[in-house]
Amino acid sequence: MEEGNFRGKDAEVSWSHVSRLTLPDGRTVYLKRQQNHYPNNILLKLRRILTFELEWRNFRRLEAAGVPTLRYVHFATRKQGGHRQSILVSEELQGMVPICDYVEWCEAHGWPRRAQRLAVLGAVVKLIKNMHEKGIIHNALYPRHIYINIGMENGHPVHPETYKACLIDLERTKYPGPNSPKMFDLDLAKMYRRIPEWPAKDGLWFLKRYLGIEKLTPEAKGIARKIAAGRAPRSR
């Protein structure tokens, strides 16, 4: 069990925590429980919508839109002793790691050839572009929330024949509509700035693939400068 997240004067006011459980059939799930744990958004807090309820709603919408995410298998909410409580159960992502863990391994042990790096990024850009084309932003698109199907055995990555990516932590997901500037200002900017170790030329490849262009246009260069602000470019 992870250490809980508590709010208020004591643990009875507001809390949220997660437990990792192994089921009799061998599956591993994460059981998340919370009480009176509302988002910082004033409107949602006044409506007394729990953060796990938001996460469940967003999962259902992303699932309907065909955007791969962590698989949630159960959600329930209740009132108990004057408190609002909820549980949310998700399946463990077998054979997948957050992309920041993969980058950390590469920094420590050496990066693969560029073709393999671009294959990894290709799965990520496919995921994000699909989501954005549906008018959805993740709104917390940090590398730790992007999982890639690279397994780890004896401390070394095991690369698949075909790469796939998915998202976790859907609590803050929003729906600004297609072509919203928030897709660059929020999602891509967060992702770029949190993985400064990734080679800069690969980042430009990613942007061109995302925009569907072969060469950087003046507009694309402006976007690149904007989302990469504060990122120290590196070359390989």
Image (cartoon, grey):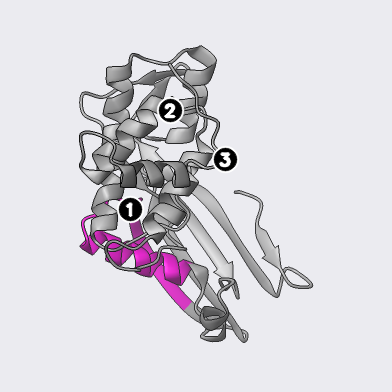
Q: CA distance from mark 3 to mark 1?
A: 34 Å
Q: Which-is-in-front pick, marks 2 and 1?
A: 2
Quadrant containing the C terminus is top left
Residue at x 29%, y 37% (from the top left corner): 216
Of label 2 and label 3, which has the lower sequence position? Answer: 2
Numbered disc 3: secondary structure: loop
SS under mark 1: loop
> Do residues under tags 3 and 1 come within 8 Å of each other at their CB atoms?
no
Q: Position of residue 235 (x, y in %)?
A: 45, 19
Identify the residue at horizontal 34%, vertical 68% (top origin). Answer: 175
Measure the alpha-carbon separation of dots 2 and 1: 32 Å
Give whichever of 205, 63 is nearer the camera. Answer: 205
Is 59 one of the magenta-colored residues?
A: yes
The residue positioned 28% from the left and 46% from the top of the image is 127
| Residue 200 - label | 2
The label shown at residue 71 is: 1
**Residue type at mark 2?**
Ala
Q: Residue at x 37, y 56 (%)?
A: 183
Examine the structure image and report whether residue 121 is included in the region drawn in magenta: no
Q: Nearer the viewer, residue 137 or 30?
A: 137
Cα gap from disc 2 to disc 3, whole angstroms? 13 Å
Residue 66, how many percent across, how many down?
21, 56
The first of marks 3 and 1 along the sequence is 1
Residue at which label 3 appears: 230
- Looking at the image, residue 209 sits to the left or right of residue 55; the answer is left
Please provide percent x and percent y for residue 229. 52, 42
Circle 1: is it few (<14), some (14-19), or many (20+) Cα within 10 Å?
Answer: some
Of helix, strand and loop, which one carries label 2?
helix
Magenta stretch, residue numbers:
52-77
